[in-house]
Image (tube, helix red, strand yellow):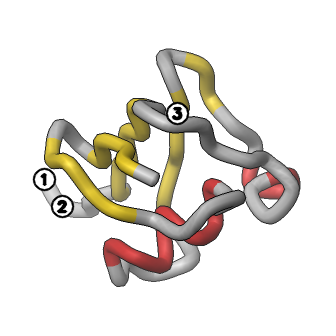
Amino acid sequence: MQVFINGEQCELGPGASVLDAVQALGVPGTGVAVAVDGEVVPRAVWPQTRLGEGSRIEVLTAVQGG
């Protein structure tokens, strides 16, 4: 299935979840926020939240510093 992660086209398996998309990026499991098609998805439901063909996923990581 084709989705867009942070604006880049990405291939994920059928029935992929938000968690699968985050893992595909290789980002750490903490300090990350995810939105799918403009809606924030709480971390607790990442494994159950299925993506559809053409979903637009934005993955944001927290950065510390000043």
Q: Quadrant of residue 27?
A: bottom left
Residue beneath label 3, please? Answer: 35
Q: Quadrant of residue 57?
A: top left
Which residue is nearer to you in this view: 31 or 15? 15
> Residue 38, how many percent across, how many down?
49, 16
Which marked residue is nearer to the observer: mark 3 or mark 1? 3
| CA distance separating discs 3 and 1 | 26 Å
> Residue 46, how many percent across, how many down?
74, 56
Query: Position of 63 compared to 23: left or right?
Result: left
Name the residue located 52 percent from the left edge and 47 percent from the top edge. Answer: 33
Q: Looking at the image, is 57 positioned above or below residue 59? A: above
Residue beneath label 2, please? Answer: 65
Q: Is residue 60 visible?
A: yes
Cβ atoms at labels 2 and 1 below 8 Å apart: yes
Query: Position of 15 compared to 53: left or right?
Result: right
Name the residue located 74 percent from the left edge and 47 percent from the top edge. Answer: 50
Residue beneath label 1, please? Answer: 66
Which residue is nearer to you in this view: 32 or 49? 49
